[in-house]
Image (cartoon, rainbow, N blue to C red):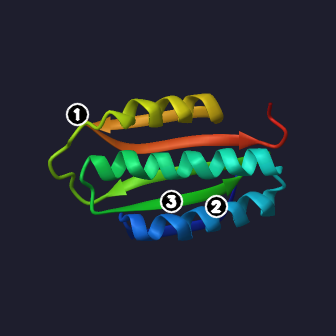
Amino acid sequence: MKNLLSLGFELNRELMTTLRLTTGGVCSLVGLDMDETEDCKVCVTESLLLLMHCGYPSARVSFSEDGGLFVSIEAEGTARESKEFPEDKISSALLFALAQEVNMEKEKDCLKSIGFRFVRNGR
């Protein structure tokens, strides 16, 4: 597995656009097509929203190449008060529908990390 990029940042909505653009660039680098790239960008955004809803102050997103793209998103810091939002179920459903090999790890009752894979032309 070849590590491509790892970014740590504060979890806030203002940085979501920057992270979506970065994700698109990394997808292009590993040869994912336009549909796979858009799906990956959705999965990154939804993962970050899930961590934000747990109240984490920051996260780290790592991209690795391994016959496609593996994305790992890990919360950093301590979760504050966890609130369940109605759209959290939709976010989780999107992840499992769009990506391959989705893994979610919880710490106590809060989501702590999310990993998923996109294989070139993996449909």
Whichever of labels 2 and 3 marks the residue nearer the N terminus, that label is: 2
Residue at 66% of width from left, 55% of height from top? 64
Whichever of labels 3 and 1 marks the residue nearer the N terminus, that label is: 3
Q: On the picture, is 71 further left or further right than 2? A: left
Residue at 48% of width from left, 46% of height from top? 46
Mark 1 neighbour class, 10 Å CA radius: few under 14, some 14 to 19, many 20 or more: few
Is residue 110 depicted above or below 8 in this figure?
above
Q: Which residue carries the number 2 mark?
A: 23
Tell me if I can see residue 21 in this picture: yes
Residue at 27% of width from left, 56% of height from top? 56
Residue 27: horizontal and vertical position, in percent? 74, 57
Marks 1/2: CA–CA distance? 28 Å
Q: Nearer the viewer, residue 68 or 27?
A: 27
Q: Amino acid at mark 2?
A: Thr
Q: Amino acid at mark 1?
A: Asp
Q: Quadrant of residue 43?
A: top right
Camera-side mark, 1 or 2: 2
The C terminus - image quarter: top right
Marks 2/3: CA–CA distance? 10 Å
Tell me if I can see residue 66 in this picture: no
Give the number of the disc on residue 87: none
Residue 73: horizontal and vertical position, in percent? 47, 52
Specify the farthest residue to the front. Answer: 86
Q: Which residue carries the number 3 mark?
A: 61
Q: Which residue carries the number 1 mark?
A: 109
